[in-house]
Amino acid sequence: MKDTGQVKIRPLREEDQAEWRRLWTAYLEFYESGVPETVYASTFARLLGDDAQDYSCLVAEGENGLVGLTHYLFHRHAWKVENVCYLQDLYADPNVRGQGVGRKLIEAVYAAADDAGAPSVYWLTQEFNHTARKLYDRIGTKTPFIRYDRVV
C-alpha cells in the first residue's frame, strides 16, 4: 500500500472498522501481542463512544485508505489540577514510514490535549523500537522513569 499523497488526520468513523482493525492488528503484532475478538469489539465501540473516560482515536487517511492510527486518553493526575493525556498506541503502515505520518498523528494528539486544557502528553515505547524513537527524540523528552508491572 504505497501512498505518496497528502495525509489527512481525522477522528475514527464507524465505516473505518476494517481498516482500523488491520492497522491495530499490525501494531499488536509488531509488539508480538494480540487480543481476543471481544477486545477488538469493545475497543472499537469505546473509541466511537462519547464517554470522556474512554480512549479516543485519530486516523491518518491517505489516497488509498487509512495509513496510521493513534489511541489516546485523558485522565486525572494527582500532581495537577488538569487532566493529562496518555498516548497509548501509535502506528503508521510500514509503506508510509518516513513520510511524516507518525509526527502528524502525535501533533494532532498534542492539539487535542491543548484543546482539552491538558498540559501534558506522555507515552511509552519499548527500548528496541529504534525507528520510532528517532521521531520521539525530536518531538518529545525522554524521561528517566522505568516501568514496572504487577507480577501475577
Image: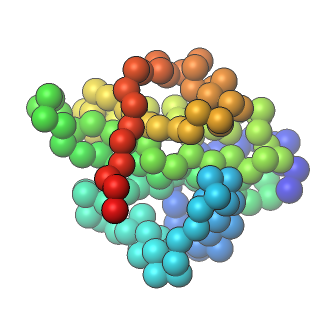
| Side of 53 where 127 appears, left or right | right
Q: Position of residue 7 (x, y in %)?
A: 70, 43
Q: As drawn, which residue projects farthest toward the right? A: 2
Q: Does residue 39 lie above or below 58 as drawn? A: below
Q: Residue at x 44, y 69 (%)?
A: 43
Q: Residue at x 64, y 65 (%)?
A: 25
Q: Position of residue 97 (x, y in %)?
A: 77, 39
If the image is split into quadrants, where does the C terminus sit? bottom left
Q: Does residue 11 lie above or below 14 as drawn? A: above
Exactly how many numbered labels are in the figure? 0
Q: Does residue 59 lie above or below 148 as drawn? A: below
Asked where in the image residue 4 lies, by quadrant, the reply is top right
Depth order, front residue of 84/58: 84
Q: Does residue 18 lie above or below 147 as drawn? A: below
Asked where in the image residue 123 lies, by quadrant, the reply is top left
Residue 1 appears in the picture as rendered? yes
Q: Position of residue 69 (x, y in %)?
A: 59, 52
Q: Position of residue 45 (x, y in %)?
A: 42, 74
If the image is split into quadrants, where does the N terminus sit? bottom right
Q: Residue at x 62, y 53 (%)?
A: 31
* Applied colour scheme: rainbow
Q: As drawn, which residue projects farthest toward the front? A: 152
Residue 23 appears in the picture as rendered? no
Q: Residue at x 65, y 74 (%)?
A: 18
| Side of 142 where 51 appears, left or right | left
